[in-house]
Amino acid sequence: MNIKYKTFILCFLFIVQMVYPQTKTASTWQSSLVSMDDSGKLTYTPDKEGNTIPDFSRVGYHHGDKSIPCYPVLKTVEPVEGDNWENIQQAIDEISGNRPDINGHRGTILLKRGVYRVARTIHISSGGIILKGEGDNVNETRMIATGRQKYPLIEIKGNGRYQEVINSRVKITDQYVPVGSHSFQVISTESFKVGDQVIVYRPGTPAWIEAIRMNRIMERPGTRQWKAAEYNLAFEREITRIEGKRIFIDNPVVMQMEERYGGGEVYTYTFEGRIREVGISDMYLESEYDDENDTEHGWIAVQLDNAENCWIKNITTQNFGYSAVSCERFAKNITVSDARCFDPKSPVTGGMRYSFNNNGQQNLFMNCLSRNGRHDYVTGARVCGPNVFYNCISVSAFSDIGPHHRWATGTLYDNVVTDRDINIQDRGNMGSGHGWAGVTQVLWNCRADRATVQKPWASGNNYNIGMKGKHDPGHFKDREEGVWEGLNEENIMPRSLYQAQLRARSKAK
């Protein structure tokens, strides 16, 4: 079956599945963990420790509470012969000098239809800049990375990192905080107020590393055993309510916190260098290359870091070596919507072809399509959730979808369709010692050739709900299975957990 036909078939299945109404009928199947009544209300059933499937709805641009804005064009750029980098960068730098309005917007730059050859990275380092084209087809606004080095074509990046507010750190006093929780007890709430931006801090400890057995990964050349100090996890949250010594937070706990493994702490923080309200839309982004194994050319179409409440929408990318969009560690509340990643040019091996890559938190990838990638919808090491991949398709993939290595937490793969595998497992000494790929990883109504979903030795579980495909025992066949429900059920309800949670939250306001 050729690629074009396979793409058509998968897209057809995807559309049919999405437009089918999310209402209960006599023949619907529901999970024992999350069920929906006729009014759309969701009920979550805890396990014996009190853990529930988390609410993943508060991800993406402004947690999904605001629509992506559309502002009038302030400046227009036309394509020129030769390198267009200077013209585009000058326009960005000019608009960056404007005072932002009440919404944080400085100005929208329109790249008119035509071909823009660009030999180096276009930098957006101020908030409120929108760069848009006149369409994402090859004959509309087409930007070509022509440089002969590995580089991102467009980089959205502020500076610095978050800073802990001195004397704000307090200990969480609960011996156990289950997954799905929106509150916990602390020693004192005197230094906090509603609206504070806080870090919920979960320390890595030797006892925890021992419990998940990542200090004894079977050695091979290059294998690194996990070190406790490298697994201090910092979850960004906002305080929504305070009652006595109990703090309530906007997004749920996605990795259980246990006193025996170090418990948890909370502190307020600032992030002065992080930029906001940046958007990229309506462009065809392409990289020149020498051959199929070229590694010295456009590597990432759009890369984000030190940025929040930004969006990438309606882009098509072609021939980049690594990814269409890569959200790095300090990229937060990013929406990547209606994006396509076609035909990467790089070796089919480690560290290559991660079509939609996420290392940040509270990010949403939706309605995306990839072709000829490897790890098409993927997270990296120590990724702090929640994060969501929703309504995404992968065709002619060379490898699997899922958390790739070293403990990603709290990811929902919702209606993800692939002609290869989706795996959540102990990857052992793959790579440099990838080990347990993640926890609180939820597959919901996905479609794959086969899947592996395993439960880590400690600190939580992983879930496969309503998948169409085959069960696979995984790389290590002696690992405990995660939670499997509804394998090959045809009429799961709700069809999309993310959309159901989003609607339920909207009704509850």
Image (cartoon, helix red, strand yellow):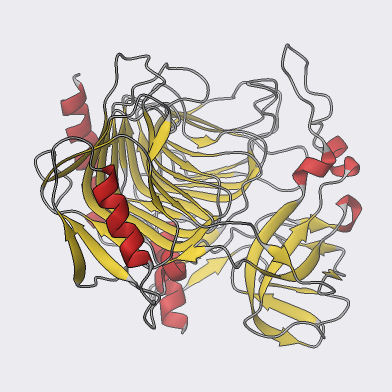
Residue 470 position (above or below residue 48)? above
Residue 496 in view here? no
Rendering coords of residue 383 (x, y %): 61, 47
- Residue 450 % position (x, y): 45, 28
Left or right: 385 as drawn, with respect to 303: right
- Residue 179 appears left or right of 5: right
Residue situated in front as seen by the camera: 12 or 297: 297
**Rendered position, 233 above or below 469:** below
| Image location of residue 443, percent across then percent down | 49, 45
Q: Quadrant of residue 71?
A: bottom left
Res. 340 image quadrant: top left
Q: Quadrant of residue 376?
A: top left
The quadrant of the image that shows the N terminus is top left
Can the viewer see residue 10 in this picture? yes
Q: Is residue 203 above or below residue 162?
A: above
Viewer-side residue, 30 vs 1 = 1
Q: How many marks?
A: 0
Residue at x 85% of width, y 59% of height = 263
Of the pair 39 and 446, the residue shown nearer to us: 446
The residue that appears at 20% across and 65% down in the rendered structure is 75
List x then y, in percent, for residue 349.
Answer: 48, 17
In terms of depth relative to the viewer, which is nearer, 53 or 491? 53
